[in-house]
Image (spheres, coloured by chain):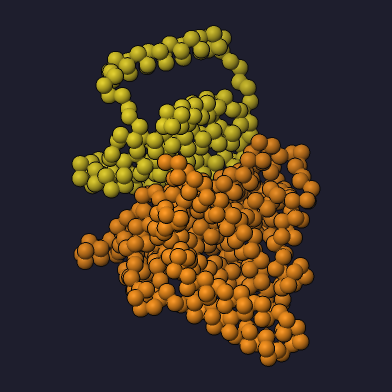
Amino acid sequence: MDLILFIVFALIAVVAAINVVVQRHPISSAVSLIAVMGSLAVLYLLLGAEFLAAAQVIVYAGAIMVLFVFVIMLLNAGGETKAGRSFVASLLGVPVLVALLILLTYFTARIYPRQTEVHFGGFRGGTAQAVGRALFTTYLLPFEITSILILIAIVGAIVLARKELE
Amino acid sequence: MDSFIVISLIKIFVVFGALMTILAYLQWVERKVIAHIQVRPGPYRVGPHGLLQPLADVVKLITKEDLIPPYVNKTLYLAAPFVAMTMALLSIAVIPFGPKIPVFGYQTYMELADLNFGVLFVLAVSSMGIYGIVLAGWSSNNKYALLGGLRSSAQMISYELPLALAIAAPLLISNTLSLRKLVETQDGWLWNWNLFHGFQYVSFIVFMIAAFAETNRIPFDLPEAENELVAGFHTEYSSMKFASFFMAEYANMITVSCMATLLFLGGWVAPWPAAYGSGYVPVAIFAVAGVVTIWRGLNPRRARDRFTFPPFGVVFLVAAAVFLVPLLQSMLLPLFWFCAKTGAILFLFMWIRGTLPRFRYDQLMGFAWKILFPIAMLNLLATGLAVALFS
């Protein structure tokens, strides 16, 4: 059951991710990206990281992607026109990609050998309580620094927007 | 395992059937309520007091011509109502309607799935529901629909923040994310409800305002403002595809009302313990209604009252008797209180629709960011401080 769900949603994630790049129209790409985020959330859920799954949907698939779609709609961006493709890119694109994937798989297998194979639902630290405790004890400093970083970004965005107004 | 699947399937059919009926009749109730607010009778032709109107509407919508304009983006145009409908119906799966009850020897919960992050699930699903409206607006390739979709996405992003902050405050008090445990912490007397127990009046009001905006209801129905945008995001939709947007709106209304009931009003628990006779309230209500109806039927003001009132009186008395059957009591009593509370909030939705005019667009955004958001933030801070000090 776990394995079937994993294969289905992993396939959806990969196909949708390829679709993000292949699609010409920005809205179609954005919708595919939402599908990627959604299936990633299901994969998190299968691993037992329920809080992460919910946060993935609320923050990424919900808020951030709505903002993407909003901007695309606001600018009324049309379909991408076919740019002149370089000869080298069309010749080497697929082989180089395959080689890269093979290298990635090889090194992942070398660094993380079979003993650390992922078990479905075996992870117990994914509840909201566990994540909250980890954030406010072990990772308190990185957590606070991240929030200050985001605050700086917000202030920066407002400063930039005000300059344009004047 | 097998019995679990069978019971789950039965529960799904029951909940789905009930939800669909309620969706159809909620629209009738709303039309009646608004009509009476505006001093007119409302639907009256199809069946007694227009009671068969929802059925007639369904037949009308199904048999109407299903038009697909040639200039739309077909895939997204067809997917949008489906997304809106699915996401609207999905969150009902985690809403608990009652406690654990015995059914033919099995112990089962009165809900479809007991997730221990139920609140987050509802938030996640409702945040995905926006795409139905946004994609409908964009794919219609129509400037009014596009404007409706744009407004909707901006409005939803803005009001989701105060909504989530208002939800967080009662969660702090109940100290859980599971909707079932949330209700269990509010058991007992009226003042154990999160609304009174933790002085959550502010977050309740913020939650309700944000919920009105999230469900695109008046006074926040700018995505479909008729006088500016024809019909907003669903301008190009007809037949069942239009109906599914309509049903999605009502399903969202029900979900939000259920959430308000669970978070603030104690879910299915009675206002006072059963030891003090709260179990006899529905019996009393139905019995009094039955007696009054029969008495009015025997002393009629209009000639036809003699024939129409007594049957209803008998129905009310039977309903009162059903609440006295011990086997059904454990199931019906929680359901009664849950429906009463949710129904009261749904009535509030209709009442406000009949009372308030629509916001102007700049007012809408300013209100969310400059008033609602700071209030929700301060309320969360105060609640957090109180919880830290007193528990």
In the image, residue B144 sits, relative to residue B302, either above or below, namely: above
Q: Is residue B28 left or right of residue B372?
A: right
**Residue drawn at 68 percent across, 73 percent down:** B35
Where residue B153 sits: x, y (%)? 55, 49
The answer to whether residue A42 is seen in the rendering is yes
The answer to whether residue B158 is seen in the rendering is no
What tint does the image give chain B? Answer: orange
In which quadrant will I find the N terminus of chain A? top left
Where residue B53 sits: x, y (%)? 72, 64
Depth check: B359 or B86 in front?
B86
What tint does the image give chain A? Answer: yellow
In the image, residue B86 sits, relative to residue A13, either above or below, namely: below
Q: Quadrant of residue A117?
A: top left
Q: How many marks?
A: 0
Q: Quadrant of residue B79?
A: top right
Where residue B82 sits: x, y (%)? 62, 44
**Residue drawn at 47 percent across, 51 percent down:** B112
In the image, residue B26 sits, relative to residue B148, either above or below, namely: below
**Residue drawn at 67 percent across, 86 percent down:** B297
Depth check: A95 or B270 in front?
B270
Where residue B185 sits: x, y (%)? 32, 63
Q: Is residue A110 left or right of residue B121?
A: left
**Residue drawn at 63 percent across, 68 percent down:** B29
